[in-house]
Amino acid sequence: MTAGDVAVRIKGVGHQFGEAGETQYVRALADTSLDILRGELLCLIGPSGCGKSTLLNVVGGLMEPSSGSVEVSGHPLRGPRPSEIAFVFQENALFPWNTVEENVRLGMLFQGVPKSEHEPRARKSLEAVGLADFAKHYPGQLSGGMRQRAALARALALQTGILLMDEPFGALDEQTRMILGEDLSVLLSRTEKTIVFVTHSLGEAVFLADRVAVFSARPGSIKKIIKVDEPHPRNPSFVTSEKFTELRNELYALLHDEIRKAVSETAPTRNGAGGAA
Amino acid sequence: MARRSERTRQLASRTVQIAFLLAVLLLWYLATTFWGVNRLLLPNPVEVWEQLMEVLRSGNYLPDLRVTATEFVVAFLLSTTTGTVVGFFASRSRFWTRVFEPLFAGIFSIPIILFLPLYVLFFGLGLESKIALGATISFFPIVLATIAGFSNVDRTLITAARSMGASDWLLFRYVLLPAALPVILGGLRIGFTICLLSILGSETIASLAGLGHHIVELAENMEMSRMFAYIAFVVVMVALLNAVVSHLEARGRRRG
């Protein structure tokens, strides 16, 4: 593997909140190293609080890790890099006082795209996510699924090489997220984007990812990486295939113990709220 | 259908409101014309109306109106600029918010009008003491609303804007300001009302000019119908101003 194939290199990244000894001290992420390849879709999956969102924020330059470093396209990362990295957040990251189209245009304004390109790029990205007819709607007038499509359109219009998605369908119902997952697979197979996708859903991870990184319970670290050898765009029938079921079961087995660990660890601290652990 | 019944209901409540005001006016007329209420205590509404027309025709109200309006405009401009600027900077760090928010809220809860004698001592009986008092009193709701507006902006929106490369100015213009504006407008509206109230009130207590001062003067000279005419004049002016402010506030909220 040559260096050019690596979009993001994560080197020994660890993160903790608070100082050792404080009650709020949480070691979220243990030393993690990982290469994210150019053009791949990597899913991060793991129990709640395993630091996968923390890692995503670190990769996006939104958070400085306590230890370790990140390189994007071979250059060390310090702070957000809007020309290379775009985000799709869990929910409610659209500006509610702006229409869908204005939201997409604002993203480009923030990123510094020349004004003349705003209109065509906004139209193209809204068409790509199937929201062309809702350009003049406000986020409050849309369903949760449509809002996430709009957030995706805003990120696509930025035309970055890397797209980071933090449980983008996490707040949606099962059926909506299934459809959005299928659409996303089609949409992204047409682009050359490198995508990191945080999810809680086993099915979503297998359906979308080229590789799935499974995290252990807190402090999180990568337990295993599973390859999903299936070309994009993924056909809906992939879900019913034997390969899908096998991979899903493998993931489930890997995750089950970690989730148990995470739950038994968080339960008592929640009961004794405020007390030193 | 639904819209129509909504409109009928609105019309009905409006009718009752107007009928109530007319009934009060009628009672007032009957009491002073037939039921022998002392006209020194309560003048006849017809007389009040004639006086009001006289006042409006003669333009005698102009010097006092000019004084009160000047006091109000200067005081409100002062409190608006200082309140929003101080509020914005106090909201920028959690430390300063924690220092100033309870402090301002505490001062806002005491009746500052009690310090009027002090203001008169410092600034005299002229416009300056009313301006200072009006500006002080209306500063607090404005600064508190500004702090609340700017410090409660959804973190996700700020993070999203930053991730897309928003500069400080773009973040302020397109995220912080529209998020905070509805809350700030609410504070400006309260500030507007109590600024006017405290200025008119302090004019009645210690001043040499202004509408409030003139009303007290008329009362002391027992010119009751003229005093009522002036009160009616001020009430209508304030009601009109309030309507304008409400309209502006609603427009600002929609655009924000």
Image: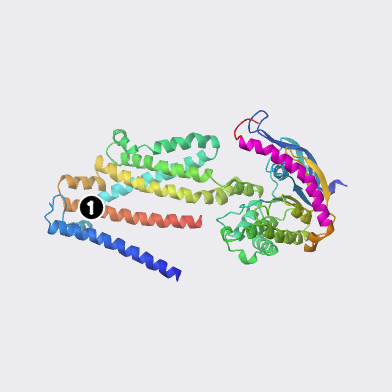
Q: Could you tell me how many numbered marks the image carries? A: 1
Give the residue at x 21% y 56%.
B55
Give the residue at x 51% y 37%.
B97
Q: Position of residue B172 (x, y in %)?
A: 56, 47
**Image quadrant in which you'd find residue B82:** top left
**Which quarter of the rendering shows the C terminus of chain A?**
top right
Q: Badge 1 is on which residue?
A: B230
Q: Chain of mark 1?
A: B
Q: Position of residue B207 (x, y in %)?
A: 25, 41
Q: Which residues are magenta?
A: A243-271
- Give the main secondary structure of the magenta stretch: helix
Give the residue at x 39% y 54%.
B245
Q: Does residue B50 show up? A: no
In the rendered view, tell whether residue A245 sits above or below residue A214: below
* Residue closer to the observer: A64 or B110: B110
In the rendered view, tell whether residue A90 sits above or below residue B86: below
Q: Position of residue B253 (x, y in %)?
A: 48, 55
Q: Residue furthest top?
A: A21
Magenta-colored stretch includes residue B88 = no
Q: Position of residue A149 (x, y in %)?
A: 66, 59
Apparent side of residue B28 relative to residue A54 in the rendered image (left or right): left
Identified by mark 1, the residue type is Tyr
Give the residue at x 18% y 53%.
B226
**Image quadrant in which you'd find residue B112:** top left
Apparent side of residue A258 relative to residue A18 in the rendered image (left or right): right
Mark 1 secondary-structure assignment = helix
* Residue closer to the observer: A5 or A224: A224
Q: Does residue B184 show up? A: yes
Apparent side of residue B253 relative to residue B17 in the rendered image (left or right): right
In the rendered view, tell whether residue B197 sits above or below residue A153: above
Magenta-colored stretch includes residue A255 = yes
